[in-house]
Image: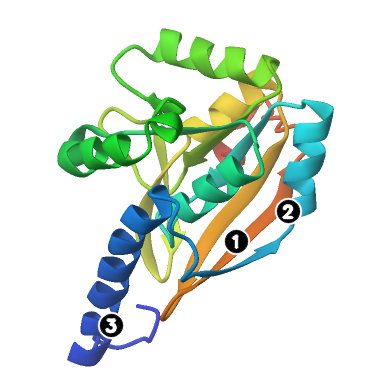
Amino acid sequence: RVYGRPARFSEVYRHILSFAHVTLDRVFLLMRKTAGFVVNRTGNQYLKALAASRTGALLVGAHLGSFEAMRVGAATERFPLNIVGHFENARMINALLERLDPQIAARVLHVGRDPISFAMGISERLERGEMVAILADRVGLNDKYVTVDFFGAKADFPTGPFLLASVLKCPVYLVFGLYFAPNRYELFCEPFAERLALPRADRQGAL
């Protein structure tokens, strides 16, 4: 869809190879073996300001690049960062990652089946001035979502992260850790909304 034509074999191969590189890099990053990586940061001043003022914030990302690159950076700079996700479908690799870095694993928040206690857990961390990172591009089981036009076709996107931000009345930032072969990661952070207000009259339309 990006190219406006069927993907070539070389493009499919490059896509899978990039995924494999990022997956392998996760192991090295969690073992703090970072000497072989080049990491550039854009917008890091926003995270530093949040940490200094102890302001809780929601960091919204996507299944693009590497969350581990951002998590290791947060640990190095002592940012109070928590990770939210559905981890039932990746138990083996997550068990490995937890063994490699128990400290980071302790800050992982599983969505689970109890939305009330899950939301309360996030609220408590935000009130303590911590950051909560969540991926907002993939619809999970029983997730609320909207269907929109995306690259010339209909696609479903979850609304949960944005509903959560509006209820918790916290600042929202966009974050991405993009991979560039062979060993470079570009980390980006930019403001999205100081407060996410959804009008009652047309909340679904606003989402």
Reading the image, the residue beneath label 1 is 187
Q: CA distance from mark 1 to mark 2?
A: 8 Å
**In which quadrant will I find the N terminus?**
bottom left
Q: Is disc 1 placed on a helix, strand or loop?
A: strand
User: Looking at the picture, which amino acid does disc 1 mark?
Assistant: Leu
Classed neighbour count for the residue bearing mark 1: other residues with Cα under 10 Å, few (<14), some (14–19), many (≥20): many
Q: Position of residue 187 (x, y in %)?
A: 60, 61
Q: Which mark is residue 145?
A: none
Q: Is disc 3 placed on a helix, strand or loop?
A: helix
Check contact, mark 3 vs mark 2: CB within 8 A.
no
- Would you say residue 202 is visible in this rendering? yes
Reading the image, the residue beneath label 3 is 14
User: Looking at the picture, which amino acid does disc 2 mark?
Assistant: Asn
Q: Which mark is residue 44?
A: 2
Check contact, mark 1 vs mark 2: CB within 8 A.
yes
Q: Position of residue 87 (x, y in %)?
A: 27, 34
**In which quadrant will I find the C terminus?**
top right
| Relative horizontal placement of residue 51, taking residue 34 as reference (left or right) | right
- Would you say residue 194 is visible in this rendering? no
